[in-house]
Amino acid sequence: MQDGSNGAETGSTSTRPDLRLGADSICGLPPRARQAWLEGLSDNALGALPWLFDFWALPHQLPPEGSWRAWVILGGRGAGKTRAGAEWVRTQVEGARPLMPGRARRVALVGETYEQVRDVMVEGESGILACSPPDRRPVWKATQRKLVWPNGAEAQAFSAHDPEALRGPQFDAAWVDELAKWKRGQETWDNLQFCLRLGDDPRVVVTTTPRNVEVLKEVLARPTTVTTHAPTEANRAHLARPFLDEVRAKYAGTRRGRQELDGVLLEDMEGAFWTTARLDALRVEAVPIFDRVVVGLDPAVSSGGASDETGIVVVGAVTKGPPKDWRAWVLEDATVSAASPMKWAEAVAGAYGRWNADRVVAEGNQGGEMIEAVLRQVAPLVSYRKVTARHGKGARAEPVAALYEQGRVRHLRGLGLLEDQMCRMGATGYQGRGSPDRVDALVWALWDAMLDPARMKSGPRVRML
């Protein structure tokens, strides 16, 4: 790669190889075809290939098309967010040749601290310096906290601990890293928006592992924001196998894992009966032999793409001794989406058989006798009980939430979607989207296993396994 006009530079359109296939497609070609493709590249194109990120990038690392003000890259730990941010900055400041201007001349790099901007965004293994080809590599001026490119473009470092430093400067692009971690996130973000006033289309890229913080939720809700998302697993080819094995073993199937590995934004509602921390503290790896297993069912009243889910949750209980000593374990969330009555009946029968259940209990306010009739077409011998809801969802869930507060309920892994709903349920009802079908099924199952007055009065029925 050269820095004069008599050679072919990195990224020049005249030497750029055909990127339409992408790295995954090239690797998937038969060996001879792959070799032929490589041999068809010029020397300059072959030398430029390592620096052409749009060829190597994962889908979530490429900027979305269309008009947008903010691009938020949500991802699990190690999902490749930093590399995507660094490469986007390159696309903004680099021109077709090393000394030619790009679309951006002044860039803000904003991290939690100045040290993190330097160590991660600038000098890190996936930072701007590591991603830049030799003929376009900027110089880091540590005393000025500034990157300077050969074409004169500059990037200034800022700390979220010092939002006032963003009063005065102006930029035509910005890269924000780990916004959800910032203690003064809203103030820093607001000041940055006033700085993005240069050029025809100033834009900002946000790379972050999601957290339930207002500034991130506000940015995501704006109509000018676009989002890409990926779990840690998407970038597994570039991660150490022991790291993946360790975090999978510890966090897979937990709410913490959904946030840190899957990159899912978990929204705990203020005043909710359950929280992420409380549910993760109740996680267990093994279960005892149960005295009773109940399948809770909250059937959807319609089927098709726009219908609610049919909540199906399995609970096992140990009911020896007085009721205050009874304990329960939530074993499986077998909920199905947009299913016909026969499909959800088959899912219920499957869960009933897998766990050798004693009973299916279902809310019959809507559907009435149809629920039992459909279920018995699939599983004629299933033990079934219809219950009627006489109170609102929040009031029904409160006695069940009390069981959790008493430490009498535990969860197996793999209940993430159920737990998402639980963290949006409080005394005023459900504050999430749609209907809390999974929570309703959980409530009915735990009520039958642990709170049914008739069972509590008559004592446990120990079943033979």
Image: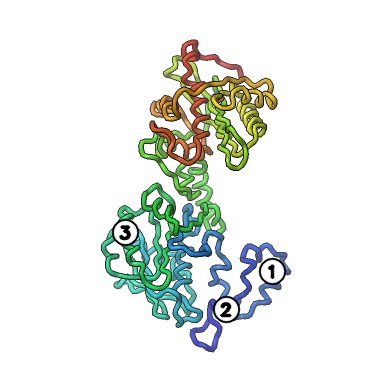
| Few, some or many residues within 10 Å of mark 2 (<14, 14–19, 20+) | few
Q: Earlier in the sequence, mark 3 or mark 1?
A: 1
Between disc 1 and disc 2, whose residue precedes? 2
The correct choice, above or below, for 436 with respect to 358 in the image is below
Q: Which residue is mark 3?
A: 188
Q: Earlier in the sequence, mark 3 or mark 2?
A: 2
Residue 44, can we see it? Answer: no
Tell me the kind of residue under disc 1.
Arg
Looking at the rendering, in which quadrant would you find the C terminus? top right
Q: State which mark lies toward you, 1 or 2.
A: 2
**SS at badge 3:** helix
The 10 Å Cα crowd at callout 1, few under 14, some 14 to 19, many 20 or more, is some
Q: Which amino acid, mark 2?
A: Thr
- What kind of element bears circle 1? helix
Relative image position of residue 134 (x, y in whole percent):
48, 77
Residue 123 in picture, x, y percent from top left: 40, 67
Image mark for residue 34:
1
> Label 2 near label 3: C-beta < 8 Å?
no
Classify residue 137 as left or right of residue 40. Answer: left
Residue found at the very far top of the displayed protein: 458
- Mark 3 vs mark 1, CA separation in Å: 48 Å
Which residue has dot 2 on it?
A: 13
